Amino acid sequence: MRLKSVHPLLLLLTALPLAACASRNEIPAYEHLSSEDDDAYCQQGGKVAVGSPDYVYCRKERDAARNAAIARADRKQRDLAEYMLNNPR
């Protein structure tokens, strides 16, 4: 039995869904708020001492911003899933 060549349209229809799956690996919206640079950010170039009230306040604010961004991303994903369940096409 001889194999037929793959039709370009079939190849395209197969590649499109796979390309959509590849976009799932995008960097999350809250990634720019990584904890690695919190220390450097809150020290403001050595102007604020670690453990000072300004430093502690800054770290709390950064943590709150990160948690809020994660919550927004989770809520957006849940809303999308619910929309897709309620509006099948």
Image (spheres, helix red, strand yellow):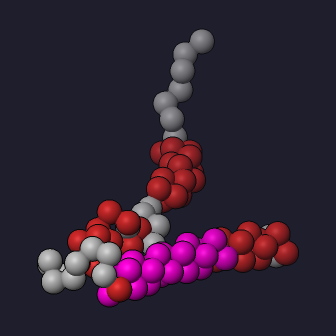
Q: Is residue 86 magenta?
A: no
Q: What x and y, as percent, mark residue 33?
A: 39, 73
When the figure is inspected, residue 35 is found, relative to residue 41, above or below; the finding is: above
Q: Is residue 32 visible?
A: no
Q: What x and y, as percent, mark residue 44?
A: 20, 81
Looking at this view, is 40 or 33 the one in front?
A: 40
Q: What x and y, as percent, mark residue 54?
A: 32, 87
**Residue 30 figure quarter:** bottom left
Magenta: main secondary structure equals helix
Total numbered badges shown on the rendered structure: 0
When the figure is inspected, residue 84 is found, relative to residue 16, above or below; the finding is: below
Location of the C terminus (image quadrant)? bottom right
Looking at this view, is 5 or 69 the one in front?
A: 69
Looking at this view, is 21 or 61 the one in front?
A: 61
Left/right placement of residue 82 relative to residue 18 reads right
When the figure is inspected, residue 10 is found, relative to residue 65, above or below; the finding is: above
At 15% across and 83% down in the image, what residue appears?
Answer: 47
At 53% across and 26% down in the image, what residue appears?
Answer: 4
**Residue 48 figure quarter:** bottom left
Location of the N terminus (image quadrant)? top right
Q: Which residues are magenta?
A: 54-75
Task: Name, please, the residue furthest toward the top.
Answer: 1
Q: Is residue 54 visible?
A: yes
At 53% across and 49% down in the image, what residue appears?
Answer: 18
Left/right placement of residue 74 relative to residue 41 reads right
Looking at this view, is 79 or 2 the one in front?
A: 79
When the figure is inspected, residue 40 is found, relative to residue 10, above or below; the finding is: below
At 61% across and 76% down in the image, what residue appears?
Answer: 71
Q: Is residue 73 magenta?
A: yes
Left/right placement of residue 51 relative to residue 46 reads right
